[in-house]
Amino acid sequence: MKEDVKEVLDQVRPSLQADGGDVKLVEVTDDGIVKVELQGACAGCPMSEMTLKNGIEKRLKEEVPQVKEVQAV
């Protein structure tokens, strides 16, 4: 599952980088929790929670059904 998550994050990454941000995979737990670190402009952006839930989490759940939640750490 971790490799699948990495592939999806690599697909999402260019959109984040276009706005000066990035995302780093920290951990994928056995119970389907994906922990990521938002970097660059995303780290301090007031819209980062929306990006995390409506962008990254939604895409991961579509592509990797085992993913239950995405958390920023």
Image: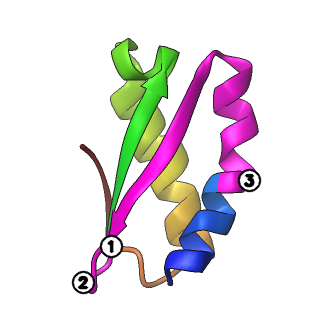
21 drawn magenta: yes
Magenta-span inclusion, residue 69: no
Indicate the amino acid at tag 1: Lys
Image colouring: rainbow
Disc 2 on helix, strand or loop? loop
Circles 1, 2 touching at the beta carbon (< 8 Å): yes
Residue type highlighted by circle 3: Gln
In this picture, which residue range is highlighted in magenta? Answer: 10-33
Q: Which residue is mark 1?
A: 68
- From the viewer's side, name the closer residue of 55 and 43: 43
**What mark, if any, has residue 40 been given in the picture?**
none
Q: Which residue is mark 3?
A: 11
Front-most of 15 and 21? 21
CB under 8 Å between discs 1 and 3 = no
Q: Earlier in the sequence, mark 1 or mark 2?
A: 2
> In the figure, 71 relative to 32: above or below?
above
Mark carried by residue 31: 2
- Work out which quarter of the rendered image holds the C terminus and state it: top left
